[in-house]
Image (cartoon, helix red, strand yellow):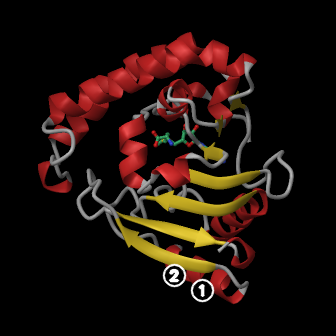
Amino acid sequence: MAMKLDGVVPFGRSWDEYVQMFQLTETDLQKSILGVGDGPASFNAEGTKLGYNIKSIDPLYKFTAKEIKTRFDQVVDNIIEQIKQTPQDWVWTYHGSLEGLRKNRERAIDNFCQDYEQGKLEQRYEIGELPKLQYRDRQFQLGLCSHFLFLYSQQFDVNFHLQGIREMLRVCEQVRIFPLLTLMLERSPHLEPVIQQLTRDGYNCEIIPVPYELQRGGNEMLKITSPDAE
Ligand SMILES: C[S@@+](CC[C@H](N)C(=O)[O-])C[C@H]1O[C@@H](n2cnc3c(N)ncnc32)[C@H](O)[C@@H]1O
């Protein structure tokens, strides 16, 4: 489906947030990494500077950095106001406050925008979207998906999730997904059926508690490993 920018909230997370959400160790970071739905996160920009090997894909990458940043500027006040209206839904241990969250999101998109043109030239940012990826079987060792799968469970059904995750497992030896909550702060109804089916397929699925939490209760990630990659 063609993506329209006026339906997108381009909020991106930082390198440090990815490290915490996915419990990335130095051993993990040495792997070839595919970030699926990385949007305007600064994971790739910051990680590349540190010398790691990361490719990000997102349908958003058909737009320019300027277009993505303009959309961010249009929606940021409204999103921050919505969060302010629902204080019971958020945990501030990481960002400290609403102002801290806003600053971190602004810093992430600024880092992303500064890196974007060069990253496109280096094919570190490529247009792509689930449920079909344009990469070879096992082209990557580690696949990450932050704040897309499970979060948008109302918009994408269980079949989309299963197809998308199987596709990530085709191109990556291991896949990690965070968070496991929907936008309504409940565990995704797709989580159990997905785990059951992937376990039947022979994958090892683990739900792992992580130190990062912003959505209240959203401090778990799903790690799925191919049997021959363990
Ligand atoms: C909430 S943002 C998360 C961005 C980033 N992963 C992060 O955590 O900071 C969700 C992202 O999913 C992307 N997206 C939408 N449909 C997608 C699809 N079918 N496959 C992959 N990514 C998709 C959006 O463009 C957006 O950038």
Q: Position of residue 159 (x, y in %)?
A: 68, 70
Q: CA distance from mark 2 to mark 1?
A: 6 Å
Q: Which mark is residue 176?
A: none
The quadrant of the rendering that contains the C terminus is bottom right
Q: Residue at x 43, y 23 (%)?
A: 109
Q: Which residue in the structure is indicated by mark 2?
A: 192
Q: Secondary structure at mark 1?
A: helix
The type of residue carrying mark 2 is Glu
In the figure, 142 relative to 60: above or below?
Answer: below
User: Which residue is nearer to you in this view: 59 or 117?
Assistant: 117
Whether residue 71 is visible: no
In the figure, 140 relative to 163: above or below?
Answer: above
Q: Quadrant of ligand 1?
A: top right
Q: Secondary structure at mark 2?
A: helix
In the figure, 13 relative to 135: above or below?
Answer: above
Question: Under 8 Å from ligand 1: the CB of mark 2?
Answer: no
Q: Are marks 2 and 1 in contact (CB under 8 Å)?
A: yes
Q: Which mark is residue 196?
A: 1
The single residue placed furthest to the bottom in the displayed view is 200
Q: Residue at x 13, y 39 (%)?
A: 96
Q: Position of residue 44 (x, y in %)?
A: 55, 32
User: Which residue is nearer to you in this view: 51 or 107?
Assistant: 51
Circle 1 Cα neighbour tier, 10 Å, few/some/many (<14 / 14–19 / ≥20): few
Whether residue 222 is visible: yes
Q: Position of residue 152 (x, y in %)?
A: 50, 55
Q: Is residue 2 left or right of residue 174?
A: right
Q: Position of residue 185 (x, y in %)?
A: 31, 62
The single residue placed furthest to the right in the displayed view is 136
Circle 2 Cα neighbour tier, 10 Å, few/some/many (<14 / 14–19 / ≥20): few
In the figure, 213 relative to 190: above or below?
Answer: above
Q: Residue at x 63, y 46 (%)?
A: 33
The type of residue carrying mark 1 is Gln
